[in-house]
């Protein structure tokens, strides 16, 4: 899985949608590229959170006092061992928050909230919006809203980290209510190369 070494310092955010095309979420310090975050988030939704996006957003966004340092393999709890092994290369590390931060004046650290009006100024290269129908991936190399990765996408999909594979779109997708079967199609942002190869560390 998980993200090559040069992704470790890539900042990102995880958010929930707000009115219109807005969003509000929380800062994630490390490993913010799609090839790292998307497999973790998809597997977490499908297994740990039992396909409950609200419970997932509560855990990842609402319950965090300051921000995330990194997302760990505890998000893969209840996933099949073969999937966990494929995504992690056999390594395990915990999710860590930024509650330990020390401010210059000794005051408690402030919650690191990210919204659609502050993300660009905060220098966030990537954002992940947890919609009822999937994860919207925002590359700050582009303006506007991003493509959607459906929640039933295979976490083993080799997602690209190149912003060109995550173009802006003009309108955010609305939830789909019809359960009519549709022909399968490649996941948004899937890399055109072969299978995933890199372990995290």
Image (cartoon, rainbow, N blue to C red):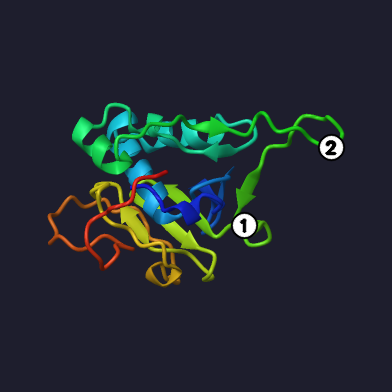
128 left or right of 79 in image:
right
Q: Residue visible at 53% across and 37% down?
A: 61
118 left or right of 76 in image:
right
Disc 1 is placed on an element classified as loop
Q: Residue visible at 28% across and 57% down?
A: 158
Q: Nearer the viewer, residue 17 or 36?
A: 36
- Neighbourhood count class around disc 2 (C-alpha, 10 Å): few under 14, some 14–19, many 20 upward: few
Residue 119 numbered mark, or none: 1
Residue 104 numbered mark, or none: 2
Expressed as whole percent of the image width and height from the top left, the position of residue 67 reads 61, 38
Expressed as whole percent of the image width and height from the top left, the position of residue 95 reads 48, 32
Q: Residue visible at 63% across and 30% down?
A: 65
103 left or right of 5 in image:
right
Expressed as whole percent of the image width and height from the top left, the position of residue 145 reads 48, 64
Q: Nearer the viewer, residue 124 or 82?
A: 82
> Considering the image in quadrants, where does the C terminus appear?
top left
- Neighbourhood count class around disc 1 (C-alpha, 10 Å): few under 14, some 14–19, many 20 upward: many
Q: Residue visible at 45% across and 72% down?
A: 170
Residue 25 in which image quadrant: top right
Depicted 89 relative to depicted 164: above or below:
above
Residue 191 in which image quadrant: bottom left
Residue 107 in which image quadrant: top right
Task: Name which of mark 2 and mark 1 comes first in the sequence.
Answer: 2
Residue positioned most to the right: 105
């Amino acid at each position: 899985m998980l993200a090559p070494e040069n992704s470790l310092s890539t900042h990102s955010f995880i958010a929930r949608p707000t009115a219109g095309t807005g969003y509000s979420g929380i800062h994630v310090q490390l490993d913010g590229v799609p090839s790292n975050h998307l497999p973790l988030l998809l597997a977490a939704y499908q297994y740990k959170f039992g396909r409950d996006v609200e419970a997932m957003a509560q855990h990842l966004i609402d319950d965090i006092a300051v921000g995330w340092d990194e997302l760990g393999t505890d998000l893969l709890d209840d996933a099949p061992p073969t999937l966990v092994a494929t995504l992690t290369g056999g390594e395990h590390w915990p999710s860590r928050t930024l509650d330990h931060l020390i401010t210059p004046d000794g005051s408690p650290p402030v919650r690191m909230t990210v919204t659609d009006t502050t993300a660009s100024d905060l220098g966030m290269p990537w954002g992940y919006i947890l919609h009822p129908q999937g994860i919207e991936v925002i590359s700050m190399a582009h303006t506007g809203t991003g493509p959607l990765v459906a929640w039933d996408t295979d976490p083993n999909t080799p997602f690209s980290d190149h912003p060109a594979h995550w173009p802006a779109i003009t309108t955010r997708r609305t939830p789909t209510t019809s359960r009519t079967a549709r022909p399968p199609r490649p996941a948004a942002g899937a890399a055109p190369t072969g299978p995933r190869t890199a372990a995290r560390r």
